[in-house]
Amino acid sequence: MTRLMPILPFLAALFLAAAFFPLLAQSQEPSEAAQGAPQEDKVVAEMDGYVLTDSDVDRLVQTLGPRAQQQLADPEKRKQFIRSWMEVKALAREAEKAGVDQDEAFQRAIDIRRTQALADYYREKVSQQATVTQEEMETYYQENQELFRHPVMVRLSTILVGSQEEAEKIVADLRGGADFAQIAQVRSKDMRSRDRGGFMGWIRPGQLEAAMEQVAFGLEEGEISDPLRTVRGWHILKVDGKRPPGYLTLDDIRDTLAQQLLQLKRKQEAEQMAREAAEKYHVQLHFEMEEGQKDPEKVPERN
C-alpha cells in the first residue's frame, strides 16, 4: 500500500472546517461522477463515485487565506494538497458509513460552525464593497497631520559582503566612480535590498542598530562610508538624500494611507452591520454588563 503523505500544516484549518462544516465539502460535489467533468477540465484525482478536477482544486484553494494560496502556487505543494484533500474525502465517507454524521454532538457542531461561517462570509462580502475616496484621504490627512510628523531622515543604501578585504576593495571602486546600485545587485548579500540596488528606504532614528545608525546619520549626502562591521557582515553605506524634521506629504503616504483607511472602513462597516442586525432581530441580553461596558439593554459593540 502506498504510504500516505502527512497533511500540510497550513491545511489543517481547511480540513477541520470540511469535516464539521458541510457547505465547503458539498460545494465541491458538482464533480461527482454523475455530473461528469468537462473535457477541458483536467481530472487530477478520483475515488469511488467522486472526481476531483483542476477547477475543483482552484475553488478549494480560494477558501484559504492569501498566504496559503501563495504557497499552493508551488506545483509540488498543490499535489500534496490534492492528496490530503482526497484523504479527507475518504475519511468523511467512512464517517458517514459509520453514522457519525447522525451523532447529536456532530449536528450541534455543524450548526455552530455554519452560523459562524455564514456571519463571517456575509460580513466580508458586504464590507468588501467599501471604497476610499481622494477627499476622504485628504480630510484624514489634514485632521491627523501629527501622525505623519517625522524626525530627521536619511535615504540609505547598503552593500553587504562577507569580509573586510572585499568591503575595502568595493569602497575603493565606489570612490573611484563605480556605480553603487550595480555593485549591490551583483555582490551584496543583503537579500532585502539587493534587487533594488541596495536601497533600504528612508530611515529614521531607531530603525538601525546603534553602530549603523551613528555612521548613517553622520554621512553627508552622496558620501560613501568606510566598511562597517555588524553581526551580519561588512556593510558599505551610502546616503542619497536627507530630510530635516517635518511632515510626510500626502503623496509620500498615499498608497499606504489608502490601504489603512480601507481596512478601517471595512471594519467599521462590518461592526455597523452587526449592530443593525442585532437591533433588527431584537437581541436582548439577560445579564448585567461589567462596569465600563455598554448598557445591558443595548446591543454590544462587536470587536
Image (tube, rainbow, N blue to C red):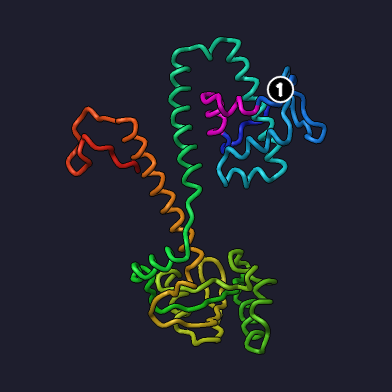
The part of the chain drawn in magenta is 12-28
81 sits to left or right of 104: right
Residue 278 lies, in percent from the top left, at 33, 34
Q: Residue furthest front?
A: 280
Q: Which residue lies furthest to the right in this view?
A: 39
Residue 178 lies, in percent from the top left, at 68, 84
Residue that numbered label 1 is attached to = 32
Query: 20 or 88, which lies in front?
Result: 20
Q: Residue at x 48, y 37 (%)?
A: 122
**Quarter of the image with the C terminus in it:** top left
Query: 284 or 62, which lies in front?
Result: 284
Disc 1 is placed on an element classified as loop
109 in magenta = no
Residue 187 lies, in percent from the top left, at 67, 71
Residue 211 in view in this figure = no
Residue 283 lies, in percent from the top left, at 30, 31
Residue 224 in view in this figure = yes
**Residue 108: which quarter of the image?**
top left
**Quarter of the image with the N terminus in it:** top right
Q: How many labels does the image show?
A: 1
30 sits to left or right of 21: right
Q: Residue at x 51, y 82 (%)?
A: 241
13 in magenta = yes
Q: Which residue is drawn at 61% across and 40% down?
A: 62
